Amino acid sequence: MKMNKWTIGLAAVGLVSLAPAVMAQTAAQQGTPLLTSLSATTISGYVDTSAVWNPGTGNANPAPYAFNAGKQDGFNLDAVDIKLSKPLEEGKWSAGYVAELNYGPDATNIDGGSQPIRQAYVDLEVPVGNGIELKMGRFDNILGYETSDSMNDPNWTRSYGYTFEPTEHTGVLASYKFADWIGLQAGVANTLTTLPVNSRQVLNTSTPNEGKKAIVSLLTLTAPDSWGFLKGSALYGGFDIGQGVGPSTEEWYVGTTINTPVKDLTLGASWDSIQDAVGMIPDAADPGAFAAGDAGYFQSIAGYASYKLTDKATLNGRFEYASGNALNNLEYYENGGSLNKVIAVTGTFQYDLWANVISRLEVRWDKNAGSGTAFGGTDNGAPSKNQEVLIAANVIYKF
């Protein structure tokens, strides 16, 4: 069997795996030494695509949840994610790492890919007690019901809660599991608000605040097997506080996932409260940059339901009510729009037809629950409708 030098080189340093027979044959033919002292790195990631239709005309002021802008009435490449990682070995003084690059309009890094590092941290296992895991570098935010990978969320579009939560921190994070039913994560970061890697400044200032940092935390309680149908259900609570938009930004979060006596039906709920909030909303004048000029108070209450119809088909729903002047301070509304309260209802049908592919059909309705208009229109800052409807197809290949 002939193998090109690139494949052989990757196998030699442990980046790809070959069957033992192929490895032995290749080594004999090429005279290539096999390095067995290096643990293999795992390569994973995904390609996220979508097609969106918004009935009616006028899309100048889309509903202001994360990654909605610029996708109306067309086909989209949402995100490309590539992740290299080496897992820890529990119970030992082991070390690993994660290096994750994120590109595209749904990239959580600054400017949608011009700074593509999403996560990059050293992972350390300290075999004390039940084992302490330490992450140092850039890591995902630990609060929130939804993640930055839409394939792991019940719905393709994001909630307003996710929109206003930070997405990554640069700092150190410790995780410890006291028992099977209780675990704690706590850490210190340069800033609470997601900013460029290694940024230390308060948002919209040019001077680093040397004496300020942010505290992040999350407590997780998991129902034991003795709780019957509730086993595996979880309750989450945490807070972030410290340097963000201002020197004392605060976020409080409570979330839960509940297994029910109805087979294959799972319920969930979340509550977010953020003081000095800035969302992941593209600047109206520059879709490649996030609006960072204004801040305010934000609160979201959301309920989730997931029902597995068959081994391949799942139906997911979300209801959310969000409020706060931070909504009205976003770039799309500060020049003429009005949005202080919003209701969003989302239904998603997922059917896994192809291997390694997530395919979803989603319908979403956003309504301005306050006075005035907030969505649509042909000019930025001049919305013409008080509601928005989205119909989307989402296809993700994960590797």
Image: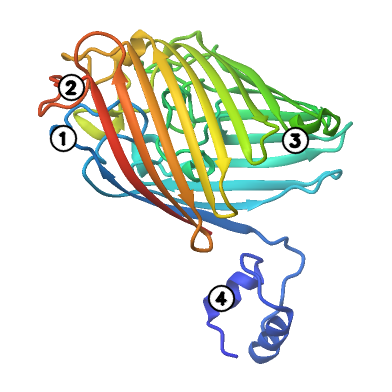
CA–CA distance between discs 1 and 4? 51 Å
Does residue 95 appear in the picture of this structure?
yes
Label 1 sits on what residue type? Gly
Q: Classify 10 Å Cα crowding around label 1: few (below 14), some (14-19), many (20 and above).
A: few
Tell me the quarter of the picture where residue 229 sits.
Answer: top right
Q: Amino acid at mark 4?
A: Thr
Asked if residue 298 is positioned above or below residue 48 in the image, the reply reads above
Residue depth check, mark 4 versus mark 2: number of the one nearer the observer:
2
Q: Earlier in the sequence, mark 1 or mark 4?
A: 4
Residues at circles 3 and 2 in contact by the CB criterion of under 8 Å: no
Q: Which mark is residue 133?
A: 3
- Check disc 1 and report the residue beneath it: 56
- Secondary structure state at the residue bearing disc 2: loop
Disc on the earlier residue, 4 or 2: 4
In the structure shown, which secondary structural element does the residue marked by tag 1 occupy?
A: loop
- Residue 340 is tagged as none
Say which amino acid is labelled 2: Lys
Give the residue drawn at x 66%, y 28%. 258
Q: In the rendered image, which quarter is residue 333 located in?
A: top left
Mark toward the start of the polypeptide (3 vs 2)? 3
Residue 124 image offset from top left, x and y in percent: 74, 40
Residue 203 placement (x, y as % from top left)? 39, 18
Disc 1 or 2, which lies upstream in sequence?
Answer: 1
Q: Position of residue 347 (x, y in %)?
A: 42, 36
